[in-house]
Image (cartoon, rainbow, N blue to C red):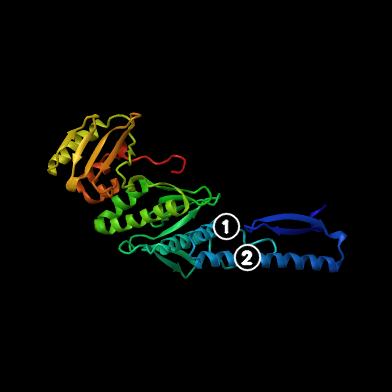
């Protein structure tokens, strides 16, 4: 069948994806061709109406399960087709931002502010106190997964996959953006509030939807173990820590497992040493299970400088499949 004699017919699946078929128009009368065109146009219009129904659920539902279902559908929905193109529409990245804002709002925990760029109808997030430094959007991958990115510095703070139920925070970008760049511009309390917002996103994705969440350096649990780049003892870095701690009036001691222990304020301890598989790790212990390695870097200047000056051996690892 040559191209000029083909009539494309489209069947829309529930998620808006197209199933394309062709017919030989030579077998159709003029009226038949017009009726076939009408039917295809109606299918496209119905597909658009179904899209608006899902979008309405994303915007208005108060049910967390319905909220997740709506973003899963929108993440793969095909609105345009060969018969009908909608010239003005929000992107899938925008829908992800709406989802996060709605999720936080359902828990009365929304601090991120959803803004709109009127020039190109794009959405973005800002956070009070750092809004002059950067803004946040999603960067979508071909499979529908996405990175939450600070656009001015192009730093991806976390990876999310709505279909695989996966959320992974990025220790490298959290360090480079928040600890290295933002910390010199804003107070540690502002960064603490932003950290709590990121923790809330991970917490609600885990508790509401059963997502597998890797909080990485944001994890405040005493059980959290932060694996460093250097698989062996980072001797040079440890020698420098001894000097830095002493200059800051803190004492570095050796523990029973050959780990270096630094006793900080309010019963908080930082330890660096080998784990069961001989991978060297950093671990934080505090009486309330509220302090993470990020918090330590945010609050203690001498430890922040020590860590940033020795990233080649001390940087906390990411999952190499995603970063």
Tell me the distance, in whole angstroms, between the alpha carbons under discs 2 and 1. 11 Å
Relative height, residue 162 to residue 279 (above, below): below
**How many numbered circles does the render carry?**
2
Tell me the number on the disc at residue 231.
none
What residue sits 31% from the left and 36% below the top?
281
Q: Is 312 on the left-hand or right-hand side of 107?
A: left
Where on the picture, by quarter, is residue 188?
bottom left
Give neighbour class at mark 1: few <14, some 14-19, many 20+ (Cα, 10 Å).
some
Q: Secondary structure at mark 2?
A: helix
Under tag 1, what secondary structure?
Answer: helix
Q: Is residue 235 above or below residue 295?
A: above
Q: Residues within 10 Å of mark 2 (few under 14, many from 20)?
A: some
Q: Residue furthest bottom?
A: 118
**Res. 50 mark:** 2
Residue 209 position, x and y percent, is 47, 53
Find residue 136 and report its horizontal and vertical position in percent: 41, 59
Res. 234 image quadrant: top left
Q: Quarter holding the C terminus?
A: top left
Taking depth in this image into account, of 154 and 55 the one nearest to the observer is: 55
Tell me, yes or no, if residue 18 can be seen here. Answer: yes
Q: Residue at x 62, y 65 (%)?
A: 50
Residue that carries the numbered disc 1 in the rendered image: 73
Residue 186 place in picture, x, y as percent: 26, 59
Instruction: Provide residue 77's location: percent of width, then percent of height.
Output: 60, 58
User: Is 13 on the left or on the right of 68, as rendered?
Assistant: right
> Can residue 154 be spotted in the picture?
no
**Do the residues bearing badges 2 and 1 touch, measured as CB atoms within 8 Å?**
no
Taking depth in this image into account, of 198 and 300 the one nearest to the observer is 198
Of labels 2 and 1, earlier in sequence is: 2
């Amino acid at each position: 069948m040559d191209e000029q004699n083909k009539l494309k017919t489209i069947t829309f699946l529930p998620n808006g994806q197209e199933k394309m078929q062709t017919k030989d128009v030579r077998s159709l009368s003029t009226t038949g061709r017009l009726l076939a065109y009408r039917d295809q146009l109606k299918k496209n219009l119905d597909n658009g109406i179904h899209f608006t129904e899902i979008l309405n659920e994303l915007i208005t539902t108060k049910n967390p399960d319905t909220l997740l279902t709506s973003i899963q559908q929108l993440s793969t929905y095909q609105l345009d087709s060969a018969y009908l193109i909608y010239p003005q529409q929000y992107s899938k990245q925008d829908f992800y931002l709406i989802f996060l804002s709605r999720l936080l709002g359902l828990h009365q925990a929304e601090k991120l502010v959803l803004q709109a760029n009127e020039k190109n109808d794009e959405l973005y997030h800002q956070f009070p106190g750092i809004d002059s430094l950067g803004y946040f959007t999603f960067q979508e991958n071909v499979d529908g997964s996405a990175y939450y990115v600070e656009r001015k510095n192009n730093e991806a703070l976390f990876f999310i996959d709505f279909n695989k139920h996966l959320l992974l925070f990025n220790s490298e970008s959290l360090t480079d953006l928040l600890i290295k760049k933002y910390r010199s511009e804003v107070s540690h309390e502002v960064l603490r509030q932003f950290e709590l917002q990121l923790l809330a996103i991970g917490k609600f994705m885990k508790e509401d939807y059963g997502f597998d969440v890797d909080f990485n350096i944001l994890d405040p649990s005493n059980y959290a173990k932060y694996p460093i780049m250097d698989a062996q003892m980072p001797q040079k870095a440890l020698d420098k820590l001894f000097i830095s701690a002493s200059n800051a009036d803190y004492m570095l001691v050796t523990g029973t497992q050959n780990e270096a222990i630094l006793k900080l304020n309010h019963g908080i301890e930082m330890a660096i040493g080998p784990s069961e598989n001989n991978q060297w790790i950093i671990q934080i212990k505090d009486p309330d299970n509220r302090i993470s390695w990020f918090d330590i870097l945010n609050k203690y200047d001498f430890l922040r400088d020590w860590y940033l000056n020795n990233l080649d051996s001390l940087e906390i690892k990411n999952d190499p499949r995603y970063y």
